[in-house]
Amino acid sequence: MKCKFCSKEAYIKLHYPKTYLCIDHFIEYFERKVQRTIERYKLLRKDEKVLVAISGGKDSAVTAYVLNKLGYNIECLHINLGIGEYSKKSEEFAKRQCDLIGAPLHIVRIKEVLGYGIGEVKTRRPPCSYCGLTKRYIMNKFAYDNNFDAIATGHNLDDEASFLLNNLLHWNTEYLAKGGPLLPGENKFVKKVKPLYELTEREVVAYALAVGLDYIVEECPHARGATTLDMKAILNELEEKRPGTKFTFVRGYLKKRGLFEVEVEKKELRECKICGMPSSGEICAFCRFWGLKEPLTFKVDRDEDNLRGT
Ligand SMILES: [Zn+2]
Ligand SMILES: [Zn+2]
């Protein structure tokens, strides 16, 4: 098949709307779509300082690559989770990705700052639950300590659709109120944005390949991803039969999100006694879980040119 816009051989067939594109026109399509997503949902301005959370995987790498190419002011943060070989590899990929992109990379290794890696803590909590808590906290604290205006993550259309489907099946209305491409900043919470919100996983993979971004394919050994994978498989099946299903599902959700918001009680937040970050209790969940006596701070010394390995 030939590209819809030129005489070159097609690189990809888009399902919705059904279009064949050559590699150059696909790259153009992808980047324009990210730009449109940013504008439609008012995610970022060009004068904002953006921290991209880089995991070593494809989605965050593509996010950083495209934001940089579109002229946004980005720096990257990789959180090394201390999960053996998997984390070592992830960090290596993150470094290579940032080299290719030409963006500064900060690295926080949780084993160095907290003493244990994910999975090494004696607790009844499953690793994925305190891993999520730890990543969210460090990402936000790092961005807050270093005056970033926004945190960008790599969530794509498939991630959002499977998140919604799973939470609808369980009627987790509180989670259903929290979807969407933009979580505005408030108090000491830095704004969070998802620039790949309207692009499918398949398109993200195709883009990574097209621009030569290498990424870790391996899943985290603790991954509780089974549910997510089931949801994604079902949605992909539906998408095959009815192209546009995911997009319509997610767009429709954004129109109806208000239905779920009314169910969420606004919790009074105070300041954590240890770290001063917003918390519902006296000590925040992060400081409590890790038994901290002193706050973790991530202030980067701007005089030092070499940001790597901090
Ligand atoms: Zn073309
Ligand atoms: Zn705290």
Image (tube, helix red, strand yellow):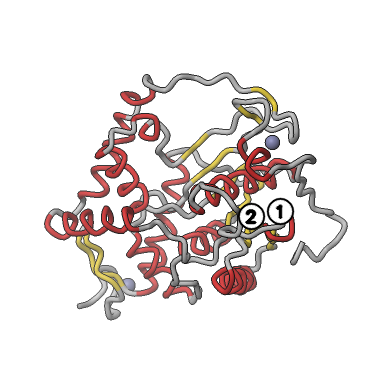
Q: Amino acid at mark 1?
A: Leu
Residue positioned 51% across, 44% down in the render? 193
Which structural element holds mark 1? helix
Assign the N terminus to one quadrant of the image: bottom left
Image location (x, y in percent) of residue 243: 17, 55
Q: Amino acid at mark 2?
A: Ile
Assign the C terminus to one quadrant of the image: bottom right
* Residue 248 image-quadrant placement: top left
Disc 2 designates what residue? Answer: 74
Q: Residues within 10 Å of mark 1 (few under 14, many from 20)?
A: few
Disc 1 designates what residue? Answer: 114
Q: Can I make out residue 97 in this image?
A: no
Image location (x, y in percent) of residue 3: 26, 73
| Front residue of 100 and 96 | 96
| Front residue of 119 and 259 | 119
Residue contact at pointers 1 and 2, CB within 8 angstroms: no
Residue positioned 28% across, 72% down in the render? 12
